Image (spheres, rainbow, N blue to C red):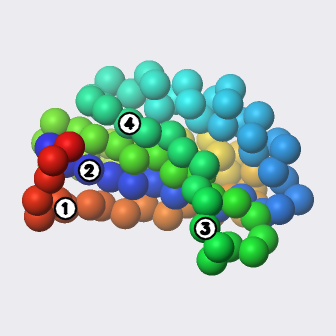
Amino acid sequence: MSVLSLTFHIEQNSLKDWDDYVENDLAQMVENLMDLEKYILSQVHTEMISEGRNTNVLMVFDNDEKRQDFLEIELKNITERIESRFGDLVMVFVTELNPLKSRF
């Protein structure tokens, strides 16, 4: 098992467009990923963000090789699509999670 977390931060003034994008485009892109075993698409609630919002995709791959392939190929495609639509209004944070113990 290999885990990856993608967090997208959107500015406050673009939330409506982002919500539509997540519902119609981002969710479909994630759903169509071939090597992805499981995922959770979430809206992040935290008191640490006072402006804008975070959306997260927690992704589970069979192995590190499939995760690396995603990072090298699919992530580039996803970020290019987001940048073409939102420019610099969306920041993408990639976190490679390397479980020490798991009960997933």
Q: Quadrant of the N terminus?
A: top left
Classify mark 1: residues with Cα within 10 Å, few (<14), some (14-19) or many (20+). Answer: few
In the image, residue 34 lies at what x, y percent? Answer: 32, 24
- Would residue 95 be found to the left or right of residue 93 on screen? left
Label 2 is placed on what type of residue?
A: Val
The residue shown at (23%, 39%) is 61
Marks 2 and 1 close (CB-CB < 8 Å): yes
Label 1 is placed on what type of residue?
A: Asn
Q: Which residue is mark 3?
A: 46
Classify mark 4: helix, strand or loop.
Answer: strand
In the image, residue 99 lies at what x, y percent? Answer: 17, 60
Classify mark 2: helix, strand or loop.
Answer: strand
Dot 3 or dot 4, earlier in sequence: 4
Q: Which mark is residue 3?
A: 2
Residue 34 vs 10, above or below: the answer is above
User: Whole-Å distance between the Cαs marked 2 and 4?
Assistant: 9 Å
User: Whole-Å distance between the Cαs marked 3 and 4?
Assistant: 20 Å
Q: Quadrant of the C terminus?
A: top left
Q: Which residue is mark 1?
A: 98
Labels 3, 4: front one: 3
